[in-house]
């Protein structure tokens, strides 16, 4: 009587002569021959001990005369001689792949592969080496859950598979055992991801946590995230190692271990944004500007941090790290301008770190543009109600920009030879400085030069974390009203 694992292997056998590699006690071979599912068989193992046990099993079952018992390292000493089916069960996925790789007569054979470990490795290897999975099923045997792969060699060009396919292959999630197998794969990835997360290895953590969630979604479940997982994703997007001294970023309000229901994204965490989170059932807010930047001397509901804490809403804020991140706010501005102006980055406007990373960029312009025309372009690009600017009266061939309230960086733009400087929150004396130095200065508004990051953050989360509900705050609006 076979256990459930070997019984599933037996179900995949289609031909008349089976070869069982790593046969051990030859239970599978004895069953197939006794039931008449195969006429002859090969029972192979790398060690004499298991082969002696195999002979005893076959003799006891009365089928020893129908089986060739062979000492072989994998398939190396096994003659092809009419073999229709090859079973390799009870080994690691990497070892199974090495056995297959060392054999040159696999075309036309029905392969039944049952990896005890490293199943994702085996799935990926098969498609990268001219094999195809015909069917894959899972089986629960006691407290263990196994997968059995039915594959053939096609000699097709190597193809890549998605990380999700590596983990679950062609399992049919209408089958309860397949769902259980998927859940166990996800559990392993969750555990690994959260261990990496707590060790500060955010990139690897996000990859594993996100894949675990994708598996859960694919198998019909709902993934679970914690506030720490949201923080890890933000640390992957905008590494905290780039935090500017004196800035307050990170998890500022809330319980890091709380389960996440829904995430609300905003540039600023205002009272209206917190109330929106309460209304829609979001218990995490991700924002650019810190909810607490200056010391608090009183706590009341006008204070957004107090209001969020009272309502169990975690607040994660990434300020300077998002300004300086690859793909962060200033890179987004570059991309927005580059589509029309054909920019080339020349240098960082304000280097902060030893690797040259910092705030903003100075760029050459592909085709010169008049100050007034640039102002109109900026109004369209940022969606501003107004663009305040000073007209230098000369064409712009080199410009600098920095998101947010960076009017104070005007002298850096001048020192780097820029004909124009684009930012937000320009003060009166900075307009005078621009006039005196013959540089076109543009104030596109703090909100408009930074709120552009919110859709980017949502898209990054959506790509990484399956099944997580993400919402851009409707209350996330320009706090300034204009009379035109």
Image (tube, rainbow, N blue to C red):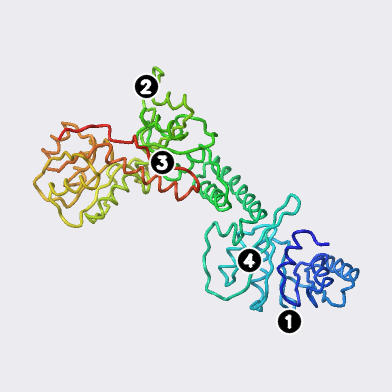
Please tell me whether mark 4 sits on a helix, a strand or a loop.
strand
Location of mark 2 (residue): 302
Q: Residues within 10 Å of mark 4 (few under 14, many from 20)?
A: some
Location of mark 4 (residue): 135
Establish if 238 lies above or below 274: below
The disc, 1 or 4, on the residue closer to the chain's N-terminal end is 1
Mark toward the viewer: 4 or 2: 4
* Left/right of residue 58 with respect to residue 130 in the rendered view: right
The disc, 3 or 1, on the residue closer to the chain's N-terminal end is 1
Separation of marks 3 and 2 at Cα, in angstroms:
23 Å
Mark toward the viewer: 1 or 4: 4
Q: Residues within 10 Å of mark 2 (few under 14, many from 20)?
A: few
Q: Which residue occupies 30% across, 36% down?
A: 477
* Numbered mark located on residue 82 in the image: 1
The disc, 3 or 2, on the residue closer to the chain's N-terminal end is 2
Q: Residues within 10 Å of mark 1 (few under 14, many from 20)?
A: few
Please tell me whether mark 1 sits on a helix, a strand or a loop.
loop
Location of mark 3 (residue): 471
* Numbered mark located on residue 338 in the image: none
Snapshot quadrant of residue 97: bottom right
Could you say where residue 403 lies in the image, as x and y percent from the top left? Answer: 28, 41
Please tell me whether mark 3 sits on a helix, a strand or a loop.
strand
Mark toward the viewer: 3 or 2: 3
Please tell me whether mark 2 sits on a helix, a strand or a loop.
loop
Do the CB atoms of the residues marked 1 and 2 lie less than 8 Å apart? no
Could you say where residue 392 lies in the image, as x and y percent from the top left? Answer: 10, 44
The disc, 1 or 2, on the residue closer to the chain's N-terminal end is 1
């Amino acid at each position: 009587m076979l256990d459930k694992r070997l019984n599933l292997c037996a179900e995949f056998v289609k031909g008349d002569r089976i070869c069982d590699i790593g046969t051990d006690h030859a239970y599978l071979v004895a069953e197939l021959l006794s039931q008449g599912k195969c006429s002859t068989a090969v029972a192979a193992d790398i060690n004499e001990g298991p082969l002696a046990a195999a002979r005893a099993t076959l003799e006891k079952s009365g089928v020893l005369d129908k089986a060739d018992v062979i000492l072989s390292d994998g398939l190396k000493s096994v003659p092809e001689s009419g073999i229709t089916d090859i079973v390799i069960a009870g080994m690691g996925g990497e070892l199974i792949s090495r056995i297959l790789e060392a054999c040159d007569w696999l075309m036309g054979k029905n392969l039944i592969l049952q990896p005890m470990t490293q199943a994702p490795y085996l799935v990926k290897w098969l498609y990268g080496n001219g094999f195809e999975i015909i069917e894959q099923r899972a089986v629960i045997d006691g407290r263990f859950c196994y997968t059995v792969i039915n594959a053939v060699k096609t000699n097709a060009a190597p193809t890549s598979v998605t990380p999700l396919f590596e983990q679950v292959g062609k399992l049919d999630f209408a089958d309860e055992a397949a769902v259980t197998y998927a859940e166990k794969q996800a559990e392993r990835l969750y555990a690994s991801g959260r261990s990496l997360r707590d060790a500060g290895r955010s990139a690897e953590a996000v990859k594993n946590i996100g894949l675990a969630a994708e598996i859960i979604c694919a198998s019909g479940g709902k993934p679970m995230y914690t506030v720490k997982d949201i923080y890890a994703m933000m640390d992957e997007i905008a590494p905290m190692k780039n935090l500017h001294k004196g800035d307050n970023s990170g998890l500022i309000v809330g319980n890091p271990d709380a389960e996440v229901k829904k995430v609300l994204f905003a540039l600023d965490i205002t009272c209206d944004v917190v109330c929106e989170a309460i209304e829609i059932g979001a218990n995490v807010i991700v924002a650019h500007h810190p909810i607490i930047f200056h010391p608090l001397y009183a706590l009341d509901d006008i204070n957004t941090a107090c209001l969020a804490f009272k309502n169990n809403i975690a607040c994660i804020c990434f300020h300077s790290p998002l300004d300086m991140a690859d793909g962060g706010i200033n890179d987004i501005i570059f991309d927005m301008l580059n589509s029309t102006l054909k920019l080339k980055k020349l240098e960082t406007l304000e280097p902060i770190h030893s690797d040259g990373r910092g705030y903003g960029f100075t760029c050459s312009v592909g085709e010169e543009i008049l100050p007034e025309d640039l102002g109109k372009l900026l109004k369209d690009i940022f969606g501003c109600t107004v663009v305040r600017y000073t007209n230098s009266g000369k064409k712009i061939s080199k410009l600098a920009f920095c998101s947010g309230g960076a009017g104070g960086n005007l002298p850096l733009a001048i020192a780097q030879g820029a004909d124009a400087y684009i930012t937000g929150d320009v003060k009166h004396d900075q307009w005078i400085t621009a006039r005196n130095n013959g540089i076109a200065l543009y104030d596109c508004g703090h909100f408009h030069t930074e709120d552009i990051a919110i859709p980017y953050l949502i898209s990054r989360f959506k790509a990484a974390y399956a099944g997580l509900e993400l919402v851009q705050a409707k209350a996330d609006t320009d706090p300034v009203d204009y009379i035109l």
